[in-house]
Image (spheres, rainbow, N blue to C red):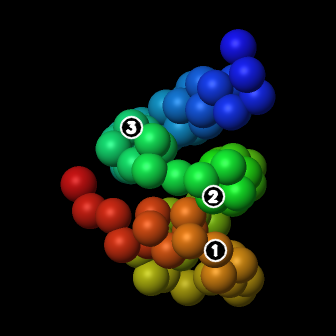
Amino acid sequence: MNNKKKLIKKIIYRSTHRGTKEMDLLIGKFVKKKINLFTNTELEELNNLLMTEDKFLEEWYFDKESEKLPPNYKAYNEFKKFRL
């Protein structure tokens, strides 16, 4: 299995095993719908996004109060625009 396939498999798993059902559903559906459209760089960005705590992601995604903003990466922007 090449590195890209390993990373995709890791991302899919991590996107559906977040810790809260709400984020599992939201991020999991986003990843399953978009993962094959991302370049290697964007997959790395997405992997970094998945290392972020659910609380912060939820606050950022739903435009609640959040002290830090994520980098301006394509994967982050695509997730922010995604709706179930």
Q: Quadrant of residue 13?
A: top right
Number of marks present in the image shown: 3
Badge 3 vs badge 1, beta-carbon distance below 8 Å: no
Separation of disc 1 and disc 2 at Cα? 8 Å
Question: Which amino acid type is marked by label 3?
Answer: Lys
| Figure quadrant of the N terminus | top right
Q: Residue at x 64, y 74 (%)?
A: 73
Question: Which amino acid type is marked by label 2?
Answer: Glu
Which residue appears farthest toward the top when viewing the image? 1
Badge 1 vs badge 2, beta-carbon distance below 8 Å: yes
> For the residues carrying marks 2 and 3, which lies nearer the camera in this image?
2
Mark drawn on residue 42: 2
26 relative to 77, above or below:
above
Q: Quick one: 37 or 64, which is closer to the camera?
A: 37
Q: Residue at x 60, y 32 (%)?
A: 8
Residue designated by label 3: 32
Label 1: how many Cα within 10 Å (few below 14, some 14–19, many 20+): few
Question: Which amino acid type is marked by label 1?
Answer: Tyr
| Figure quadrant of the C terminus | bottom left
Secondary structure at numbered mark 3: helix
Q: Quick one: 56 or 82, which is closer to the camera?
A: 82
Residue designated by label 1: 73
12 relative to 78, above or below:
above
Secondary structure at numbered mark 2: helix
- Image location (x, y in percent) of residue 63: 44, 82
Q: Residue at x 64, y 26 (%)?
A: 5
